[in-house]
Amino acid sequence: MLFKFFKPKWQNQKPEVRLRAIEEIGHDTPDSSAVLEQLAQSDPDQNVRQAATSRLNNLSLLVKISQHEQNEQIQRSARDRICCLIVDQHSAPIEDRLSALITLDSSNLLTHIVLKATDQTLQQSALERISDQDALATVIRTCALAQLRRQAAEKMTDQPLIEALIKETLGRDKSVSRIFRNKLSELQQAEQVTQALQLRCEELSASINQLASGEYFPQYGAKLQALTTEWEKVSASATSDIHAAASSALLAANERLETIKAQELATQQAQALAAAQAKERSAMIDGLRSAAASLIKNAAQNSVPESVSHEPVELLVTQWANMENVPADHQKRFDQEHKRCTQLLSSIAEIVNQADTIQTLALQAAETDILPEGQLEKRAKQCRATIKSIAWPSAENKAAALRTLENSRRAFDQQLKLLQQQSQSEFSAFEDALKQLETAIEEGQSKNADRRFKHAEQALQKLGRSCPRNLERRFRLLTARVQEMQEWRGYAVSPKKEALCAEMEALAGNGMEPQQLANKIRDLQQQWKLLDSTDSVHSHRIWKRFKQAADEAYKPCEAFFNSQKDVREKNLVNRQKLCDQLQTYLDGINWDDANWKELDGLLKQVKREWREYSPVDRSPGKKVQTLFNTRLAELEGPLKAYRQENGELKRRLIEDVKALLEQDDLSTATDEVKEIQVIWKETGPTFRNKEQLLWQQFRELCNDVFDRYHQNRRDQSELKSSVTLEIENLCLEMENAQSPFCGLHRLNELLEFAEQTYDDVEQQLTDQSAQRFQAVYLELKALQQALQSMLDDEVKALQRKAVLCEQLEIALLEGDYEETLTAVYDSWQDDSHLPTPTKHNIDARFQALCALAEQSGDALKDCLTEQDAYLRQLCIRLEIALGQPSPVEDQALRMEYQMQRLQQALAQQEEALNLKAVKALRCEWLCVPFSSHYPALTQRFEHLINSLL
């Protein structure tokens, strides 16, 4: 109970009492550390625990509380207490303080340790754990140790803060300022790389978007693959928006590519199907055409064509009807061929039906007997009717049967025409005979009147019933007058008959040739008949005498003519053999593989032999002649069809050559003409009366094509020669423009003229001239681009920074540079137009000037001395690059420089204008400090540069 009244305050149940007790506890109080530790760990009130924690000296316990305490304020109090104990060098050993420092992550606490701690090890350890840029800036601004400031500067990454610190430390903390300038340069370079990557990402995204939304082209897939590969390499540097846009565009482009590929596949399949269908349709049309050709050949080679089935044609028609989407031109061609086959089939069927009629008409046409006019007209009409019923297509080669019919019709028409002409001539002959008879009677020429009377009588017999009545009455009157003259003339005829008898008797045994003797006997018999016809008294005695004398004189002739009968019979047999041989040849010939030349020779030989086997007896010879004509017709029909087909083919070849005359591509035309000439040689002959005419036309047309070809080659050769000379002169002028260099303005004019000239004559150039022009043109084009690069954004940006450097240089020389340095630094901004090496060089010039601002005046003098030699060397290098002489006073330096290059195994002098080197020299000049303070060298250098522009 007594113990209860003397209980310590820190054990009181009231929190406010425990708080006061904590304030009253001193470090010299016994067990103070234990009490504070107990309260910090186990007191139920958080304010008590926080107050106890803020007075602890046990670093390990504070670390434990900072890590495991649930209350954030107590944790913060523990960390604050740890910071205070670390700064206090007497609170704990250095090792414990370092261990406790590791647990701290607050930038403010760590900064406090860096600034307040007295142990450099603790300061460096704390500084290493600081990453906050503002905390590092605080260290740089307030820390007394330069080493810590430099370490903090090395850890800076915030570019705006670095730029602000550069201004603050400029002229006060040179080492830190130098670190910041280097750091800023590195950051700017890193930012440029990042910007370049982001810019490339934007460009790739735009390219992918354009590809996805633009027109499709053949290299679409390859382009997409290349963009995808490049995007995968740089996509990590892209912003989220660009990444999303590019990914969406890639997806759309790939989907589009797949769709187009599917469409192309479908199109190819459709085209392949259409090509197959077109090929099938063409095969069907060719099938109809082949069927028509077979029908024509069958009809041309056979007088009675073989029976032809309609099934192949009907099958093709059925198959065609099942075809879908047939083009109009194919349908038209098929309909034409189908109509052609239908007409041919119908005509051949009619020929087969009319075969007997055609054969009968052919035999009748071959007969030599003279028929009445009415019968001839009937047969000719039957021929025409049969031809009309056959209805053979007029555009096709005629069938053998049709040619036979036409020959028969012409034969009947010819006979009818001859008969009509003969009838008309007989009328005229009878009338003339009557006139001559009247004349003879009027003149009293009895003998002539008797002869004219017989002629008139024969003419009357030929006329028959067709004689007009007036002529018949006239003939009867003249007959009475002739009889009256004969009665008076009878008294003078007998002496003449006696003379004929004596002349006939004298012929017996006189040794005359049999044929001549027979002719003499026949002549005397004709004279006897004439005298006897005018004799009114016919004496049998004197006639018997004349007859016996004639028989006796004819005996030698009779033996001769009996021997001639054997010859005629032998000729008849030989003619019959010729007909049999023709029949054998007909039976064995294969018209599909006939030797037309052999057939032509055979027909000529047979006709020649037929003429040699003459004479023959009339009646049997007529039958053999008809058979021979039939066999010849059967052989000559296919031969004529073959020749006609050859003629048509040769006419088509002539038309093809005519078409080639109008063709522009004469080289192809001559090749085709040569192929046509080969076809002409392989083609058999046509009819003799047409062959020479066709050959003449064909040869003249071929010569015209070849003449055009050779003339065109001569023209092209002359044109190429003139064009080649013009281009050679232009190339020479372009080459001369490079050495010595003519200047950018003249170069632009020359290139424009060269482009226009080349476009005008490109088609006429030889490969060698074109290659030379392209080589020289590309050299000038590269030279033009290099010269234009002398005025590009890189040089302009470099010149702007060089002007800033010149301003700072003037300020350094005048000694008042602080404001200028600040102004130049504010204007010194990153320029994306400058490549990294050039940017590094101009930044080096600026940094060198900044370093001179921090150094003594002797350093400035040394720099000015060094720049004179360096700038003079740059002038010499530029003069060497441009092939220009150096001033006399610099000849030794130029020789020394060239010797140095020679020792480095480089060329002694440039053989061609190297504008990249010239541009590099110009950029190098702009990066040299104090270059503008040497006016003579500057004017010398700029004069060389201006000579190029």
Image (cartoon, rainbow, N blue to C red):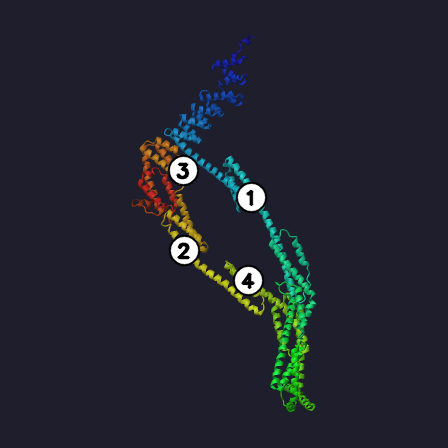
Say which element carries label 2.
Answer: helix
The label nearer to you, 2 versus 4, is 4
Is 211 displayed left or right of 620 in the figure?
Answer: left
Is 29 displayed left or right of 395 in the figure?
Answer: left
Quadrant of the frame with the C terminus: top left
Is 72 displayed left or right of 452 in the figure?
Answer: left
Say which element carries label 4.
Answer: helix
The label nearer to you, 4 versus 1, is 4
Q: Amino acid at mark 2?
A: Glu
Categorize mark 2 by other alpha carbons within 10 Å: few (<14), some (14-19), many (20+).
Answer: some
Check whether the beta carbons of the residues at disc 2 and disc 4 lie within 8 A of each other.
Answer: no
- To which residue does mark 4 refer? 655
Categorize mark 3 by other alpha carbons within 10 Å: few (<14), some (14-19), many (20+).
Answer: some
Cα distance, mark 3 to mark 1? Answer: 45 Å
Q: Amino acid at mark 1?
A: Leu
- To which residue does mark 2 refer? 726
Cα distance, mark 3 to mark 4? Answer: 80 Å
- To which residue does mark 1 refer? 257
- To which residue does mark 3 refer? 840
Residue 549 rendering spot, x and y as whole percentages: 67, 90
Say which element carries label 1.
Answer: helix
- Residue at image point 64% right, 52% down: 323
The numbered mark, 2 or 3, whose residue comes first in the sequence reads 2
Image quadrant in which you'd find residue 644: bottom right
